[in-house]
Image: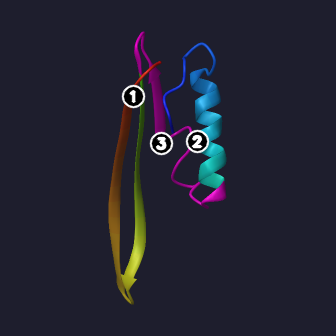
Amino acid sequence: MPARPKYNNSDEDILRQLERKARELKLENYINVRTCKIQTMDYRRKISCDYDRTEQVIPGWKKTFQFRNEADQPLL
């Protein structure tokens, strides 16, 4: 997501956009208000999403994958 001026898009607006995209990709169980944080500072915005996802790799064996994603962009 490109950097956007903080006064045109609040953290809540950005989070709604993120949640909308997560629904489109069927990731809403993992990417949501509980797992993502948005911090807007004077000159930059940081978005971080941390979540775990357990999947069956082969029959009888499940693995938990940890996802730690962060974007840190300057505000224009």
Q: Residue at x 44, y 22 (%)?
A: 39
Measured as percent of width and height from the top left, residue 57 is found at 36, 81
Identify the element where label 1 is drawn. Answer: strand
Residue corresponding to mark 3: 35
Number of disc labels: 3
Mark found first going from the N terminus, 2 or 1: 2
Looking at the rendered structure, which numbered label has been put on residue 73? 1
Circle 2: residue type: Leu
Q: Residue at x 40, y 13 (%)?
A: 43
Identify the element where label 2 is drawn. Answer: helix
**Which secondary structure dominates the residues rendered in magenta?**
loop
Which residue is nearer to you in this view: 60 or 45? 45
Measured as percent of width and height from the top left, residue 42 is found at 42, 9
Task: Please give left or right for residue 7 compared with residue 3 in the image.
Answer: right
Q: Residues within 10 Å of mark 1 (few under 14, many from 20)?
A: some
Identify the element where label 3 is drawn. Answer: loop
- Nearer the viewer's eye, disc 2 or disc 3? 2
Q: Is residue 26 magenta?
A: yes
Q: Is residue 37 magenta?
A: yes
Residue corresponding to mark 2: 18
Distance in Å between CA atoms under marks 3 and 1: 19 Å
Q: Quadrant of residue 69?
A: top left
Most extreme residue toward the front is 76
Look at the image and give the residue range highlighted in magenta: 24-44
Circle 3: residue type: Thr
Measured as percent of width and height from the top left, residue 73 is found at 39, 28
Most extreme residue toward the top is 42
- Nearer the viewer's eye, disc 2 or disc 1? 1
Q: Residues within 10 Å of mark 2 (few under 14, many from 20)?
A: some
Which residue is nearer to you in this view: 64 or 5? 5
Q: Residue at x 34, y 63 (%)?
A: 65
Distance in Å between CA atoms under marks 2 and 1: 15 Å
